[in-house]
Amino acid sequence: MNDLVPPAIADDLEAGRKASNLAFALRILPAARRHDALVFYRFCRTLDDIADSPRLTSAEKAVSLDAWQRALSAPNRLPNGLSDLVARYEIDPQLLLEILAGIRAELTVPRYATFEESRQYCWRVASAVGLVSIRIFGCRHSGSEIYAESLGLALQWTNILRDIGEDAANDRIYLPLEDLDRFQVSESDLLGRKDSANFQRLMAFEAHRARDFYAQARQALPAKDRTALLPAEIMRATYERLLRKMTAGGFRVFDRRYRLSRLEKLSLAAGIYFFRR
């Protein structure tokens, strides 16, 4: 993928590969599937790092994403590793284009008026990723698709809540504006990083929405694919714990970044591996 990776993000891409929650969860996979999952993960991280890089101008980001659009629209132009993945796992190329559309929206759509608009963004950048991942994991049951879609929404909604302060600094608001209106929180309140009773009620409402997505994922988890979905279940446990941490901590998202320690992650992974198989 070197020709599609701007030099300015190469180091950040490698650092992200080592540090992310997903990379941690993928370690549980058999070696061959782990390799393939990391090839796909690198594709996703590349797009994400292009959109987020402070070293690239808006024009340079657009040029890079346009190059990926052309590559994804013609199978013979995909990087070899990704092309092989698409063929072997019979991955629908449209899912990769949906992921790209979600990433592109991060540069062009700073606000979402309704929940459905926010949900579509989350589906593209997270649920579509899950739908590709379950092919690589070896899932066979149709219920795994429902699981992947619901879990993707849950994970991304949790990310949105955790990153409200960081996104505000970049003039981005991913929560639906209709929800802000409902709880009488203005855009300037978020951009100004203003905590308030109304903000706390808004966050409690959105956290409840995330918990509903997690519940939907748990209900959809098919017994026949339980072992194949162990990495996804580790992600679910990790981000549910993160959501509980934010809730218990009073959603102090403007002055801290909530995260789990390595020990907490290892404990959750061990619980999933030894007691959920």
Image (cartoon, grey):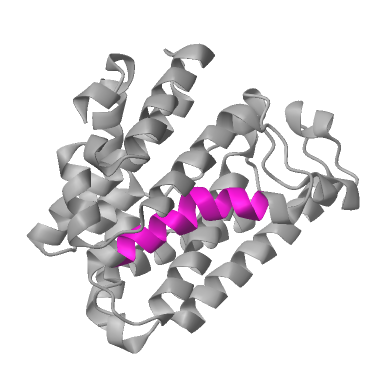
Q: What residue occupies the far left of the structure in this picture? A: 31
Q: Is residue 237 left or right of residue 122?
A: left
Q: Residue at x 42, y 53 (%)?
A: 95
Q: Is residue 244 left or right of residue 74?
A: right
Q: Residue at x 20, y 25 (%)?
A: 2
Q: Quadrant of the C terminus?
A: bottom left
Q: Is residue 130 magenta?
A: yes
The foreground one among 252 and 229 is 229
Q: Determine which quarter of the picture holds residue 81.
A: top left
Q: Position of residue 3 (x, y in %)?
A: 23, 22
Q: Residue at x 47, y 27 (%)?
A: 51
Q: Is residue 181 left or right of residue 20?
A: right
The foreground one among 250 and 187 is 187
Q: Is residue 231 above or below residue 105?
A: below
Q: Is residue 49 above or below residue 248?
A: above
- Asked if one can make out residue 245 in the rendered structure from this viewpoint, the answer is no
Q: Quadrant of the N terminus?
A: top left
Q: Position of residue 62 (x, y in %)?
A: 48, 21
Q: Position of residue 120 (x, y in %)?
A: 62, 53
Q: Find the magenta span and give its range.
A: 118-134
Q: Position of residue 163 (x, y in %)?
A: 57, 39
Q: Main secondary structure of the magenta part?
A: helix
Figure label count: 0
Q: What residue occupies the far bottom of the structure in this picture? A: 223
Q: Is residue 172 above or below residue 128?
A: above
- Asked if one can make out residue 105 in the rendered structure from this viewpoint, the answer is yes
